[in-house]
Each structure stands twice: as structure tokens, then as C-alpha cells.
Image: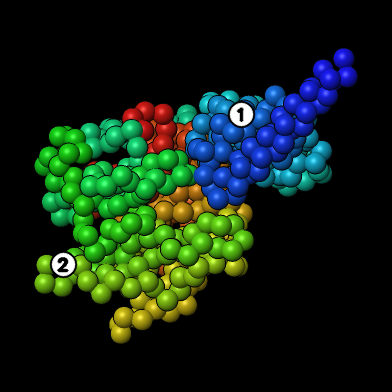
Amino acid sequence: MKKFLFIWFILGITVSTFAQQELKRADTYFERAYYSDAIPLYEQLLPRNKSSKLIKNLADSYYHTFDMKAAARWYGYLISNYGENTDESYYFKLNQSLKAIGEYEKAQKILIDFYVEKDQNDKVIQTEKDFKYIKNVSAIGERFKIENLNINTTTSEFGAARIDSNLLYSASRKKTKTLPKLYRWNNENYLDIYSHPIDKITQGDSLSMPLSSAINSKMHEGTFTITKDRKTIYFTRNSKKKTEKDKISNLKIYRAEYVDGTWKNIIPLPFNSDNFSTEHPALSPDETKLYFASDREGSFGSFDLYVVNIQKDGFFGNPLNLGKEINTDKKEQFPFLDEDGNLYFASNGHAGFGLLDLFLSKTENGKFKSPDNLGLPVNSGYDDFSLSLDSNTNLGYFSSNRPGKG
């Protein structure tokens, strides 16, 4: 009998040690933003461990990989079991997850109940006002006709803009001669910028060609903007250096010049940093200003929109925050300016349908007015972002991770 108990004791220690090792591995994946790899490890540990930290990390992993049904489930579990010790950000993410899966009234109640308990009456009033606003926007109905392009695949395509006779866009790397290095956030290939003939847009992505081997690197290349003379491009690329604190690399904006048929003189802009992200460049109509998103110090929230003057000598002024009319304590990203100087951008801080929505802030006397939600069907419960408009037609392009092709 003693021998039997001793064996069970040893087995218990072995199982416990294995579980601790697996938890440590899952936490390491999570801290490095390897969310797709962290999820199965956390799920495997759930029967023996439902600590608040594990549940937070699991819910966040699903949230960042856009499994919003699973995210809502685990944020709900977290708040039901650890609500008193859970900060506002998790209530907000539960609110966003519920919106994504169409449970708008429950999403509103989650936030209102939290703000009532914290005696934050101003936020109760704002949440109710936002809910009413979105109901009014929904009542307008569909103001756009949208179409899922044939160049889309089951992986990522976004940031499309028409440049002359081609559509340029960012996508997971399509063809590699060697075994590709995966981006372990979502286990897809790294991003490159591609070009596709507009007149063959219905023929699928097999005709999409990499923009340039000088611009596309082993890192991510994403959103971009090109001058009207087609001689200068600004684009987003992630840094090779990872931050000491978060073990992740930030984004930077680069500039390249088109010389003798190739892109050359590629340099990072001087207001980048390894310590924060600078991303999503957009030019003003007269090309004297560059707009971008950043989470640098001094932001109102996670990411804000900024503008910097482009001087005649090619240098830049100091970046200026667009202010609280545009920016919130959440995310504002993916700016675009039309020919009239009106600002389009994505935000999850203004009244929306869930996650990132697209907004329009009209310009008046050189200032941007309070933004309006672009409404249905452009916006959904999922991320809707990166809009561009063709000034010569009634056509535009935008990106969304709503359930569909990918």
C-alpha cells in the first residue's frame, strides 16, 4: 500500500512539474505575442488551472487572433469570477467582443454596470449616448455597395490603393523559394507590398507581383502612400530590434525614391524610435504634410493620429498630435486624406459597431470637425480600416477582418 501511495506521489509531482513547465512556455509565447502558439497550451492547462492570469492571457490571445466568440467567452468568465480585481480594459474588450458577435445590448450593459459601480457617471452618459448614436446610424441603412475582391485569400490582404493602372496592397508573402519564416502572432507569412493590374482585378491574386525587392524585405512591409509624381513612397516596416520590456518589435515609417526605374535611397524617418511605433503614413493633398499613427509618449491613448510638416529641403518638422477632437483614450490608426483634405481614419474609441470602425472628419477652416461613423456596410462588428478613395471615380477600397475569405 505504501509503495502504491509513493508511486502516486511521484506521479503527482511529475504531472505538477510538467504543468508548470507548460505554463511557463505558454506565458513566454504570450509575452512575445505568439498568440496562435499560446492558445493550445493554455487550453490544455485549463482543467487544472483557471487562475485570473491564465484566463486573461487566453482571452487576450483569442482577441488578438480575432476569434471573438472565444474571446467573449473567456472575458465573460474572467469578469464573472474575478470582476472585483479586473480593470476597465477587460470590460472594454468584453464589450468589443460581444459587439463583434452581434450582442450589442449585452455589450452596452457590461460597460454601464461597470461605470455605475465605479460612480463614473460621465462614462455612463457617454456609453448611452454612443449606443443611441450607433442605433441612429444603423437606421440610415446601407450607404455603400461593397464587394469582396478576387485577389483576397485565406490570409491577410489590406491597405489597398489605386496607383495609376495598378492596385497596390499589403499581403502575407505569397511565393518563397525557401521555407518561409512565419509571423507567430497568427502563423502567417510576413507582409510584403504587391501590385496588381486594375483591369485584371477579377482574375485572382496569381497576377499580383511584389512591388520591389528593395522595399520588400524579410521584415513586414505594410501601409504606404506615394506622391503624385510617383517619385517618392512612404511605407511602414517593422523594426529589427525588439524592445527590452515587451520583447516585440515596433513599426517605423521609411521613405524611398524612384530613380532610373528602381526604388533607391531607402531611409527611416527621423521621428521613428525603437521604443514606440510610427506607422500608416498618409499625405495631405498638397503633399506638404505627412499624417501617421503612433503610440509615442504624450498620446491620449493607445495610438493617436499625428501630423508633421514636410519641408522643402526634404527635412521634417516636429510631429503634432491632432488633438482630442480626433484622438481618444483608445486606438486611432490608418489615416487617409481625400482631395478636399477631409480625414478618414479607423478607431475603436469613437462610437462604433465593434473593434475598429471607419470615420470621416471633415475639414473646415483648416481644422478637423468631430468625426462621423461611416456606417453600414463598410463598418461591422470586426476591424474595418485602411480606406482609400479614388478622386476620379466613385470607387474606394477598405480592409476588414469580418468573417469571410480571410
**Closest to the observer, 264 or 314:** 264
Secondary structure of residue under mark 1? helix
Q: Label 1: few (<14), some or many (≥20) within 10 Å? A: some
Q: Nearer the viewer, mark 2 or mark 1?
A: 1
Residue 35 point in image, percent of width and height: 53, 41
Q: Which mark is residue 43?
A: 1
Q: Residue at x 66, y 40 (%)?
A: 21
Disc 1 marks a residue whose amino acid type is Glu
**Closest to the observer, 9 or 20:** 9
Task: Find disc 2 in the rendering and name its residue.
Answer: 262
Disc 2 marks a residue whose amino acid type is Thr
Secondary structure of residue under mark 2? strand
Residue 128 point in image, percent of width and height: 66, 37
Residue 256 point in image, percent of width and height: 27, 69
Question: Marks 2 and 1, how far apart in space?
Answer: 49 Å
Quarter of the rendering containing residue 287? bottom left
